[in-house]
Image (cartoon, rainbow, N blue to C red):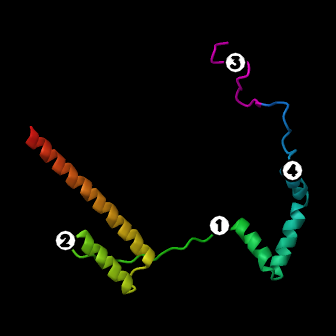
Amino acid sequence: MSKKESASTWKPGQSGNPSGRPPGSSEVGRLRAAISEHLPEIIEQLVEKARGGDTQAARLLLERVLPPVKAIEATVELALPDGATLTEQGEAIVRAVAQGVLAPGQAGALLTGLGSIARLKEVDELTKRLEALEQAAK
């Protein structure tokens, strides 16, 4: 064996503690085993309670079977002023919220996007200035 390999090196599929606790012997494992024996009856009782109007039973069943419904915002067409500055575009977005044309969440996303564009423009402008200074120094 090389120095990197030792007698204690685990091999794929081999336990690092072969004489350790057997699978399923923990408290959780025993609880799961006890419940699994009665699972069909438990589910049947939950279904019957849900059919009888028990909203908690219905909720428990539905939460386990159906994925949660996600809210979807309707798309809105928003015309921003042509050739406007980022500030003017931001003001137009805020006006659209005030007029009820745009949801506040949508406006927040748009304003965040405008902020990102502003930072990109700053980087572009700084890059141009730096290149001009380097050319002037040569």
Q: Name which residue lies at 43% across and 79% down.
A: 103
User: From this viewpoint, is residue 114 visible?
Assistant: yes
Along the line of sight, the residue nearer the viewer: 63 or 65: 63
Q: Residue furthest bottom?
A: 99
Q: Which residue is mark 2?
A: 83
Residue at 17% across, 50% down: 128
Which residue is the site of mark 4? 27
Neighbour tally class for label 4: few under 14, some 14-19, many 20 plus, Cα within 10 Å: few
Q: Circle 3 is placed at which residue position?
A: 6
Magenta-span inclusion, residue 60: no
Q: Amino acid at mark 4?
A: Glu
Q: CA distance from mark 1 to mark 2?
A: 45 Å
Three-letter amino acid code at disc 2?
Answer: Gly
Q: Dividing the picture into quarters, in which one does residue 71 lie?
A: bottom right
Q: Please, what is the three-letter code of the amino acid marked with disc 1?
A: Pro
Q: CA distance from mark 3 to mark 2?
A: 70 Å
How busy is the neighbourhood of tag 2: few (under 14 within 10 Å), some, or many (20 plus)? few
Q: Earlier in the sequence, mark 3 or mark 2?
A: 3
Find the distance from the CA under tag 1 to the CA under tag 4: 29 Å
